Image (cartoon, rainbow, N blue to C red):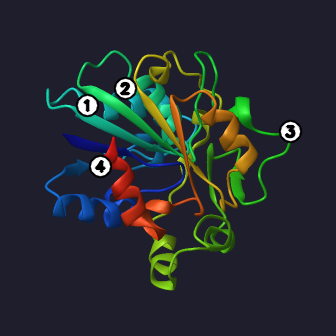
Amino acid sequence: MRIVFVHGACVKDGSWWWHRTGELLAQRGVASEAPVLPSCGETGEPAGAQGPGLAEDVVSVRHVLTASDEPAVVVAHSYGGIVAAEAAAGIDAVRHLLLVSSYLPEVGQSLSSFGGEEPAPFLDIDPEGGTFTVRPETLAPTFLQDCDPEIQRQAIDKTARQSLAVVGQPVRSAAWQHVPSTYLVCADDHGTPVARQREFAGRAGSVVELDAGHHPFLSQPAAVRDLILAL
């Protein structure tokens, strides 16, 4: 069994975001990897109006998922659920989806389907440049409030400007409709409202709730490891 981690929006260096849980899995002999998301500038092509979007993110994740016939669990976080909905569809090796405080779209839905009329206050949006990111001063209190100070400090350098196009690009598949799925509700998440998470969780096959913030794989890695191994 291998684990494929799909990170959320506005960050880069996916392996760092998952490293605490990944290291614990490695100790149990379970390998993991985190595909790059081109829309976050991770392939060197600048994010922006003409830059890579959801389709490129999907291709990147599918490339990893189809590179081996070994059974895989896809662990998708936040925006990563949008990517995984399409990227994991129709791949026999994908045995389970674990969705962590994740968007869970129906076919034809996009990230914008779940937003309000006004942008979230923690976002810095550049319409002319075609990018968005998290305001640095809001990163820790909104998304990492239950992580230790060192993680909060390092995370600042792991944020990225992402192509704004991904917000409105709809998914063409919904893998969770055909693949066994578990939704991890993060009950102390200051970024994605718990009520919204529970709505998404109603679409999943099973639900687990953890008293954690937006990144439990950093704040409570052992709990996330155990959940993954139980799948």
Please tell me which residue is depicted at 34% across the width and 15% down the height of the picture: 90
SS for dot 2:
loop
Q: What residue type is labelled 3?
A: Glu
* Distance of label 4 from label 1 (alpha carbons): 19 Å
Q: Do the residues labelled 2 and 3 touch (CB within 8 Å)?
A: no
State how far apart marks 4 and 3 are (Cα).
39 Å
* 117 relative to 80 in the view: left or right: right
Few, some or many C-alpha atoms within 10 Å of disc 1 (few <14, some 14-19, many ≥20)? Answer: many
N-terminal label among 2 and 3: 2
Assign the N terminus to one quadrant of the image: top left
> Which mark, residue 99?
none
Q: Nearer the viewer, mark 4 or mark 1?
A: 4
Q: In this view, does 28 lie above or below 5?
A: below
Which quadrant of the rendered structure holds the C terminus?
Answer: top left
Q: Which mark is residue 88?
A: 2
Q: How far apart are marks 1 and 2 (CA)?
A: 7 Å
Residue wearing tag 4:
229
Residue 13 in view here: no
- Residue 65, position as x, y percentages in the image: 25, 31
Amino acid at the residue labelled 1: Leu
Which mark is nearer the camera, 2 or 3? 2
On residue 65, the disc is 1
Closer to the camera, 105 or 212?
A: 212
Label number found at residue 117: 3
Looking at the image, tell me whether mark 4 or mark 1 is earlier in sequence order.
1
Give yes or no for contact between labels 4 and 3 (Cβ–Cβ under 8 Å): no
Q: Quadrant of residue 104?
A: top right
Q: Residues within 10 Å of mark 2 (few under 14, many from 20)?
A: many
Residue type at the position of mark 2: Ala
